[in-house]
Image (cartoon, grey):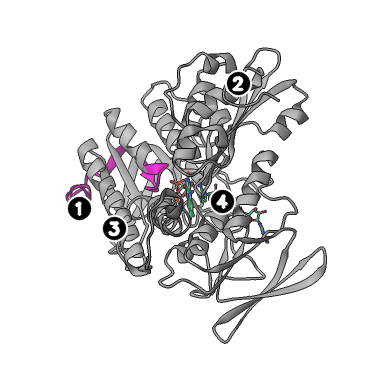
Amino acid sequence: MKNEKEAAGGADSFDVVVIGGGPAGYPAAIRAAQNKLRVACIDEWKNRDGSAAFGGTCLNAGCIPSKALLESTELYHRVQEEFAAHGIKVSGATLDVAQMQKRKSGIVRGMTQGILALFKAAGVTPLQGHGTLGAGRRVDFTAHDGTRRALTARHVVLASGSVPIELRSAPFKPPHIVDSWGALDFETVPKRLGVIGAGVIGLELGSVWRRLGAEVVVLEALPDFLAFADQQLAREALKHFKKLGLDIRLGAKVTGAALAGGAVEVSYEDAKGAQRVGVDRLVVAIGRRPYSQELLGADSGVELDERGFIRVDEHCRTAVEGVWAIGDCVRGPMLAHKGKEEGVMVADLIAGRYGEVNYKVVPSVIYTAPEIAWVGLTEEQIKASGREYKSGVFPFLASGRARALEQATGFVKLLAARDDDEILGVHIIGPMAGELIAEAVLAMEYSASSEDLQRTIHAHPTLAEGLHEAALGADKRAIDSINR
Ligand code: FAD
Ligand code: NAD
């Protein structure tokens, strides 16, 4: 607030103005300030209670609240399904959804307030309200209280993020037909939950409410499950989601959603013809689209592509000198860590330093149980490229640590080139896959061969040995599993 007043006092000229304070924008602002530049970060996010908060979708309504609920609900599930195997008998475990939601909100609050502390420490001026880019890198700022100011900057970084795509046949009608934010805030467990889209959000939030007892039906338009993932991984994942009780219906094209008596009647078509399913709540999670509403003045000169993404080059430069764009509002996967790296790259390039993002090694993680994570190419993509490859698969069933955890499901799969042994892709389904993938990302970032991994000591007994063994398996030299 103090910084805001200082800026209001006439100090409206900055080296860098960042519009958007999500996981792309706020790291850009912090790195720019670390680079000794004078920086302001504008963000307009408002929570349902009217409070303003930095952190964007990820911290307020995405990554962080979803992971908080995934953790709580997984614990509840384990108490019932897993503890007995450990010899721990628990009776009368009950659910307190209000407490679960309170914990989630506390984590979100702590993380978003943390950004203000980071800004203060780095010397970034936080400005809460709306920013619009005009010609000559002028930014018109309207604070939440309506105060307007014209800022000027040597560089402007656009980080305006994305919003959920609405389905014409099932438009949002809260509290019955909701987006992911709505589905994170249910106060009670719906008896029957419908989810449209078996993508990352559908699977994560479907798992959350299923573990708490909801009957969950997931309607996916495509005939293949997780079509964008390695298909061996996808098949294994589908098995586990079915075991959890998710009713995943593939090739289902939703044609309508009617509200009647507090429930939603969803109609869809599949290979067998017209179908219907009744649910109490419906989550529409069919992807997100870039958001740039009132971001660009008519004279800004910044171009959008045909899908609404801000057009940038590989270094996130727009067509306008000194204007950059990063995160979900530009091409590439809509992931927080991808946006963060773009923010850091841009802030370093602005300061005349080196900066790049290696788009070939952006990890993907689905935080379900078991977790699913991958980096690099799928087996299908390598086959299509025509490159000769070898594959090593290590099942967690052969991992002492996974067995001790009572989570010996899934596998690590490593794909490497036959000619020079380059690691081309790593696909993991199993306990802590999201943590384990970091080693594969590092290996690929450093252009390691599968032999480099084979010759690296991994502590025993750890889940990380799975990657070691998968690398060995690629050359039929695995020790702890049968080489096939
Ligand atoms: P955003 O986070 O959307 O932030 C943009 C900010 O800019 C917002 O605060 C917005 O209000 C503000 N803004 C926009 N226009 C203006 C303007 N003109 N003036 C001022 N402010 C403006 N990704 C992961 O990597 N891991 C996960 O586990 C994960 N989980 C997710 C779970 C859910 C339920 C959802 C919905 C998303 C999840 N994502 C996850 C995706 C992740 O949230 C996004 O990739 C990420 O938030 C994008 O960051 P961003 O900074 O580009 O945009
Ligand atoms: P998504 O692209 O992951 O999945 C959308 C799914 O909906 C796809 O399977 C698609 O085929 C299906 N679909 C599209 N139109 C449909 C229709 N009319 N009827 C039925 N199905 C339809 O998108 P999402 O799950 O909404 O997530 C949005 C973004 O948020 C993604 O880009 C994702 O990367 C990001 N996100 C990431 C994480 C994570 O990293 N763990 C978690 C949540 C969200």
Q: Nearer the viewer, residue 314 or 201?
A: 201
The magenta stretch is 1-25
Mark 4 Cα-neighbour bin, 10 Å: few <14, some 14–19, many ≥20:
some
Q: Secondary structure at mark 1?
A: loop
Q: Is residue 304 positioned above or below 183 on the image? A: above
Marked residue nearer the N-terminal end (4 or 2)? 4
Q: Is residue 24 magenta?
A: yes
Identify the residue position indicated by label 4 in the image.
Answer: 200
Amino acid type assigned to the residue bearing label 2 in the image: Ala
Amino acid type assigned to the residue bearing label 3 in the image: Gly
Give x and y (percent) for residue 347: 38, 31
Q: Name, please, the residue furthest toward the bottom.
A: 261
Give x and y (percent) for residue 132: 42, 52
Amino acid type assigned to the residue bearing label 4 in the image: Val
Identify the residue position indicated by label 3 in the image.
Answer: 106
Q: CA distance from mark 1 to mark 3?
A: 22 Å
